Amino acid sequence: MKPIVSAWIIPGLEETREDYLFRIICNHYKTSVEAVTSSSRRSEIILAKQAILYYLNKYLKYHERSLAKKFHIDRTTVLHHFRRYQGVLDLNQFKAKELDEKIKNICEL
């Protein structure tokens, strides 16, 4: 079967950057993609969801409305998640900064 060629495919992988971003963040926060896309409110899942929303917007240029539709939440909730995760990064938490560097390297491929 011939692989689908797309500008968003990571060189050497048969995975989109979005899927790869989901996987990296979920592994980092030790949760699953299914849990992140669910309506669970456990703290580690919320932190992973905030990170995914933040990085999809920052590096892959997803708009708030499309993220809200994808995660079945309100647009203002998406904006709230952006602010909360930016606060986590501003507090200079080591784990968040480490993830930020990983994501930055991935998205600059």
Image (cartoon, rainbow, N blue to C red):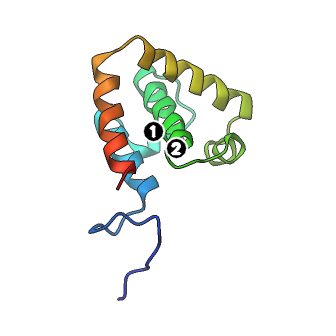
* Figure check: 27 above or below 84: below
Residue under the point 37% across and 53% down: 20
Answer left or right for 31 relative to 50.
left
Q: Which mark is residue 56?
A: 2
Residue under the point 61% across and 47% down: 62
Helix, strand or loop at label 1? It is: helix
Task: Name the one closer to the observer, 71 or 109.
Answer: 109
Residue holding disc 1: 35
Task: Name the one closer to the observer, 38 or 50.
Answer: 50
Percent position (x, y) of residue 108?
A: 37, 50
Q: CA distance from mark 1 to mark 2?
A: 17 Å
* The N terminus, quarter of image: bottom left
Percent position (x, y) of residue 11?
A: 31, 67
Q: Quadrant of residue 76?
A: top right
Residue farthest to the bottom?
1
Residue type, label 1: Ala
